[in-house]
Amino acid sequence: MRYLKIAGFIYLMMSFAYAGVSIDGTRIIFPAESKSVNVQLRNAFDTPSLVQVWIDTGDSEKIPKASEVPFILNPPLTRVEARKGQIIRVIPLDIKKLPQDRESIFWFNMMDIPPDDPALKDKNYLSFTVRTRIKLFYRPSELAMTAFLAQQSVQFKYDQGAQNVSMNNPTPYYLTVVQIESGKNQAFSSADQAIMLAPFTHVILKDFKLDTSTKKIVYEVLNDLGTLQTYETTIQ
């Protein structure tokens, strides 16, 4: 315990150097007809930062081979000056191999590496490398419906025998459902429990209790801008 207290004291006495580059938005939509899509980075700090970007296919622990990702990023490594921004271009390669009847999902990664601070040269300090990871959706041009209509199309079915509710996505879009309510009952206690439904899939809401006095379900979905949209539907 004594050593822990000493370590904690040293930790509190240290100065901190950490990254300050952020990404505009919480998701990236890449329409099939686009030649490129811009991702805006912004450095909110008074010091420049080195930023590395890449795309992965879902495994956050590894950087995939170039052949596994149908996009390139330009520039993949860049310096973002203090209080300024930087555009990263997402450029398609062989996207024709991707399914054209539904969306595909990838992940855009940004590693923000803060520079050494000359003012802290002779001091103890901690330097944090910050990684940000957001979703990148490839959207074919001839899907059966719009994203707005898809968000309204989530279906809920009650299995009286199993005493559970299933949530079905009959659309070609990825849908992130943040909250579900039936009367006073809620499916999630925090946004961290949100469910992303892949196209044409369903999940069982095992811990969700249906309010049998109402046939209404109210649910919230993240739209393309990363804001919440609320919809109401009838339980089947």
Image: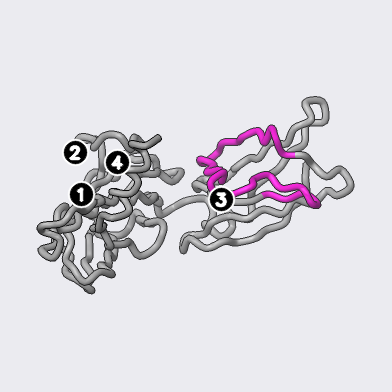
User: Which residue does the numbered mark 3 point to in the structure image?
Assistant: 191
Of the pair 191 and 117, the residue shown nearer to us: 117
The residue positioned 52% from the left and 50% from the top of the image is 144
**Residue 40 relative to residue 178: left or right:** left
Q: Earlier in the sequence, mark 3 or mark 2?
A: 2
Measured in 3D between alpha carbons, the distance from the residue under mark 3 to the one under mark 2, in whole angstroms, is: 33 Å
Q: Earlier in the sequence, mark 2 or mark 4?
A: 4
Q: Amino acid at mark 2?
A: Ala
Measured in 3D between alpha carbons, the distance from the residue under mark 3 to the one under mark 1, in whole angstroms, is: 31 Å
**Residue 77 relative to residue 103: left or right:** left
Q: Position of residue 127 (x, y in %)?
A: 22, 52
Q: Which secondary structure lies at badge 2?
A: helix
Q: Earlier in the sequence, mark 4 or mark 1?
A: 4
User: Which residue does the numbered mark 1 point to in the structure image?
Assistant: 72
User: Which residue does the numbered mark 4 point to in the structure image?
Assistant: 56
Pointer 2 local density, CA inside 10 Å: few below 14, some 14–19, many at least 20: few
